[in-house]
Image (cartoon, rainbow, N blue to C red):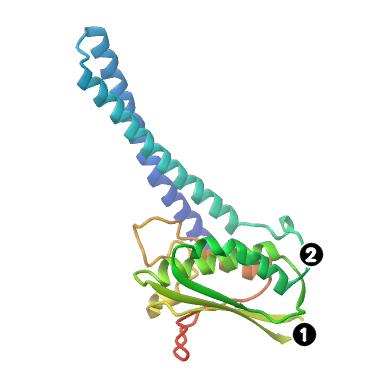
């Protein structure tokens, strides 16, 4: 409940910022419109003034669009955090086949980069579970590794491996050779609104969504560890 309260408060704070910015921008557009009307009525509207008003309103409109997209993204990600298991479809699937299909969704992240990935999945693992949320969790982990782990690096590699632990239980490991995290960041990696790129965009809910999916929808557990040998520094 404490974590939920922190999450809600964080979402409200994050949404308030772009909405507050939009209120300011709308006020500016209103002032520009009034001045434009006054200049037209008084006959004082020159060509330069007209282009100034038009360019100012276009710039303000672009700011409105950016801020509204930020709000929409926050709401969408917040809904993913609150996803109810009853809304997901339980089905039987071949894990290797589904992950190979998922790799098509991963490819755009790696286009025009020297980053690579490999899926190490044994054949014949049948699961009666929720693949769509699992796929979302995997995509979020890959995205996090590229954005944060490989930041400032021209090359990087991600491994996804699957090991059967015992009957009815398996472990999915995602490892990258990125720059890793500090001990403090590592301990808070799955908390909402925690990021190593503060003020540089994003919703800061990516790994929190992963945690929510794994622990609620999939009824599993998740941990984040630094590995020294081999040099796979991030492991989910």
Q: In this view, does 127 lie to the left or right of 199?
A: right
- Rate crowding at label 2 as few (under 14), some (14 to 19) or many (20 or more) other CA atoms within 10 Å: few
Q: Nearer the viewer, residue 81 or 40?
A: 40
Residue drawn at 37 percent across, 37 percent down: 62
Q: Residue 107 lies in what quarter of the image?
A: bottom right
Question: Which image quadrant: the C terminus?
Answer: bottom right
Residue drawn at 45 percent across, 68 percent down: 146
Q: Which mark is residue 159?
A: none
User: Percent position (x, y) of residue 217?
Assistant: 68, 65
Q: Residue 209 lies in what quarter of the image?
A: bottom right
User: Percent position (x, y) of residue 139?
Assistant: 56, 65
Question: Which image quadrant: the N terminus?
Answer: bottom right
Is residue 1 in view from this perspective?
Answer: no
Q: Nearer the viewer, residue 145 or 119?
A: 119
User: Which element is circle 1 on?
Assistant: loop
User: Percent position (x, y) of residue 178?
Assistant: 42, 77
Q: Mark 2 points at which residue?
A: 91
User: Which element is circle 2 on?
Assistant: strand
Mark 2 vs 1, N-terminal side = 2
Q: Name the residue under label 1.
A: 167
Q: How far apart are marks 2 and 1 (CA)?
A: 18 Å
- Rate crowding at label 1 as few (under 14), some (14 to 19) or many (20 or more) other CA atoms within 10 Å: few
């Amino acid at each position: 409940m404490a974590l939920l309260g922190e999450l809600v408060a964080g979402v409200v704070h994050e949404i308030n910022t772009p909405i507050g910015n939009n209120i300011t921008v709308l006020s500016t557009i209103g002032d520009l419109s009034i001045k434009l009307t006054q200049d037209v009525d008084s006959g004082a509207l020159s060509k330069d003034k007209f282009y100034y008003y038009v360019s100012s309103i276009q710039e303000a409109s672009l700011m409105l669009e950016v801020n509204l997209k930020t709000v929409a993204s926050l709401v969408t990600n917040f809904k993913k955090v609150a996803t109810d298991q009853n809304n997901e479809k339980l089905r039987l699937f071949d894990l290797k086949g589904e992950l190979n299909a998922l790799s098509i969704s991963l490819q755009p992240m790696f286009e025009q980069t020297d980053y690579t990935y490999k899926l190490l999945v044994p054949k014949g693992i049948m699961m009666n579970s929720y693949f769509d949320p699992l796929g979302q969790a995997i995509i979020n982990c890959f995205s996090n590794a590229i954005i944060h782990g490989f930041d400032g690096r021209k090359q990087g590699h991600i491994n996804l491996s699957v090991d059967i632990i015992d009957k009815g239980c398996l472990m999915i490991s995602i490892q990258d050779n990125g720059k890793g995290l500090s001990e403090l960041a590592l301990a808070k990696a799955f908390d909402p609104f925690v990021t190593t790129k503060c003020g540089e965009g994003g919703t800061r809910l990516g790994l929190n969504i992963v945690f929510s999916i794994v622990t609620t929808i999939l009824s599993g557990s998740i941990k984040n560890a630094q590995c020294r040998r081999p040099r796979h520094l991030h492991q989910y």
